[in-house]
Amino acid sequence: MLNENVVKEVLSTVTYPGFTKDIVTFGFVKAIEVSGDRVFVELDITSSAPEVAQQLRDEITKKLELKGAKEVVVNIHQPKMPRETSSRGKNLAPQVKNFVMISSGKGGVGKSTTTVNLAIATAMQGKKVGILDADIYGPNIPRMMGILGVQPEVVGNKVKPIETKYGVEVMSMGVLMEEGQSLIWRGAMIMKAVEQFLRDILWSDLDVLFIDMPPGTGDAQLTLAQSVPVTAGVTVTTPQMVSLDDSRRSLDMFKKLHIPIAGIVENMSGFICPSCQTESDIFGKGTAHEVALEYGTSVLGEIPIEPAIREGGDEGKPVVYFHPESETSKRYHKAANKLWHFIEKVNEEGGASNEMIQPTTPPGVSACSTPQQGGSHGGGGSCGCSH
């Protein structure tokens, strides 16, 4: 006989398209009503794709009819479809609609962890997503995404990004070099590597490419901003004043490079006890709000310390995917949602542009020896933002 428990058991066998988890585990089932042989199911899913909704509707209807339902009504709520970008200027990867630069003033603040979880949360919301690990000196994304040792496929003279089970494409220096190998690169080599990651990788037609930058404000950031129109910049910090001082440099860099500032992610913002779920303020909390106000932006999320984050990073099991019920996961999803709304706003208002920061110095002439022209970094070259 049909009842709510039977229906929920059936729904727990319906896998969310593109993932390995079911719609009950993801928390997408919002209501179940059973009246005789009539069943009503309400879902709130993260994908905007109509084919995803139709696939779920068909599978749920078929499985419930096998259980004896004569009438099945599936009501599905979805977010809006992504808007087309209106960005302008030089773009080495034109098939990518939007670029998000994830930056930090210093290392060790959880920048790569933030990149991974924001990217997967965005993919779970129905967007086509990629991650470019441009942190040349510390490429940690392969470990965090569970693809250590996986070699990318070479097609002609280009490389295909690695497909992951999270619906996110990934490319990193970490999959092209031996584990534990160190890199000592000059500025010109870094700039060339960033350009190749954009031009010579066969990225799909992505809604958004998240780019995990090296810490600081130097050659890699300038080269990226000159190579593609960056739609949004995100700064990652911790609540301590020393970290916030470095974050100001990162936010100032976004302004000088004409990159729209989406906001700040405050990492290690409180500690959630795994036993009692009590949140304690051990490193400070909420201090990024004042800095955000200084730069006319907001805090996208205050991400607490939870053992599941560390375990997820070490074991290649990102918290937003493997612990969707956790407070940390919920905050990442909220931050990803805010970020996407910001991207849509930028595109509605004319899009991003890197026209003002293109290099104007003649080939072979150092930008450091010539007057700056054009925009804040019109001189181009490798002086970058670190001076």
Image (spheres, helix red, strand yellow):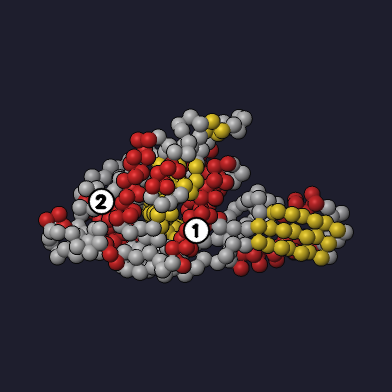
Please determine whether, in this image, residue 273 is positioned above or below residue 326: above
Which SS class for mark 1? helix
Which SS class for mark 2? loop
The N terminus: image quadrant: bottom right
Q: Percent x, y for residue 123?
A: 52, 57
* Circles 1 and 2: CB atoms closer than 8 Å: no
Task: Using the rendered image of the protein, determine whether residue 152 is visible from the camera's viewpoint.
Answer: no
Q: Is residue 151 left or right of residue 63?
A: left
Q: What residue type is labelled 2?
A: Cys
Q: Percent x, y for residue 250?
A: 33, 47
Query: Of 244 and 165, which appears nearest the observer?
Result: 244
- Spatial separation of the CA atoms under disc 1 and disc 2: 27 Å
Q: In which quadrant of the rendered view does residue 262 lie? A: bottom left
Q: 10 Å neighbourhood of mark 2: few (<14), some, or many (≥20)?
A: many
Q: Say which residue appears at 44% left-offset and 63% top-offset.
A: 346
Q: In this view, does 220 lie to the left or right of 113?
A: left
Q: Percent x, y for residue 32?
A: 77, 55
Q: Say which residue appears at 25% left-offset and 64% top-offset.
A: 358
Q: Name the residue under label 1.
A: 340
Q: Which of marks 1 and 2 is nearer the N terminus?
A: 1
Q: Is residue 334 left or right of residue 3?
A: left
Q: Which amino acid does label 1 sit on?
A: Trp
Query: Of 48 and 279, which appears nearest the observer?
Result: 279
Query: Of 353 and 92, which appears nearest the observer?
Result: 353
Q: Say which residue appears at 50% left-offset and 41% top-offset.
A: 303
Q: Say which residue appears at 55% left-offset and 66% top-offset.
A: 81
Q: 10 Å neighbourhood of mark 1: few (<14), some, or many (≥20)?
A: some
Q: Residue 55 carries which label?
A: none
Q: Name the residue under label 2.
A: 385
